[in-house]
Image: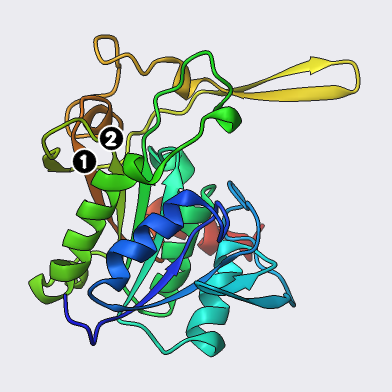
Amino acid sequence: MSDDLEILLTNDDGIDSTGIRALYDALSAHANVTVVAPADDRSACGRSLSHEVEVDDHELGYAVHGTPADCVVAGLAELGPFPDLVVAGCNKGANLGEYVLGRSGTISAAVEAAFFDVPAIATSLYVPIDDTPFAEIEMTADDYTEATRVTTYLAERALEAGVFEHAAYLNVNVPLPEGEAAPIEITRPSKRYEMDAERDGTHVTLHDRVWDDMAPDALPDPEGTDRRAVVEGRISVSPLTAPHSTNHHEALDELADGYSSH
């Protein structure tokens, strides 16, 4: 990685999270890294944008009182040098499957960068869930060793390799480190979607059931998907595109043609 490489680093867990500090330390050893990240946790906010945000100086860069998408727009258009690459993460918790692509703040930062024609890498750490509430699970810098290693590897090589001539951004999901380095598998997002809701009086509780079936021996996701790769201990790298494509079809053409005579 060249010291001349400019990287904008953001996340959705907040600028004081362990994951972004781990990535900053790894990337800044070889590149010029400007951090523009939310002042607090803005997980699962998608591409929500603000009209105006406050910005504070921070030892890592800039703390923005807004969303990850706010951070990317502010960072690219005003706060930092225009980068060669945007990196989002490292997120505590995986971002797996098609349905999270519009929901995750981490992924949304990468998508926002794509609209600026800046390639991006979104990196998330898969944290297996047990009986401990997820918010109470504490991560250390060592837990992000594999995530920072693969992100640095991709940042060093993906641009020159021409990866971003075919993909707008990479969605990277990494298992917890276990001795030897995990291999990379190029994957596609899983299509599983298992949301439901339950009403109790004036309240409706939403449940994401996808995470209920993550045991390796019972995982229903097929080979080649991001969920199967990371649960089985491999690093999932999904090359994705933005903006979203359209599917032009004659059935809709016929409806359009018949509208004026309706």
Residue on which disc 1 sits: 235
Name the spot of residue 245 as percent of width and height, x first: 37, 61
SS under mark 1: strand
Residue found 71% across the figure and 70% down from its top? 50
**35 relative to 14 in the view: left or right:** left
Residue at the spot 56% in from the left edge and 57% down from the top edge: 16
Q: Horizontal and vertical percent for residue 182?
A: 14, 38
Q: Which image quarter is the C terminus in?
A: bottom right
Does the CB distance between marks 1 and 2 fall below 8 Å? yes
- The extreme top residue here reads 218
The image quadrant where one finds the N terminus is bottom left
Residue 129 numbered mark, or none: none
Secondary structure type for disc 2 = loop
Could you tell me residue 86's position as x and y percent?
A: 37, 71
Query: Tag count in the figure?
Result: 2
Which quadrant of the structure image shows residue 95? top left
Label 2: which residue?
A: 175
Residue 245 visible in the snapshot: no
- Relative placement, left or right, of 68 versus 66 is left
- Left or right of 217, for residue 254: right
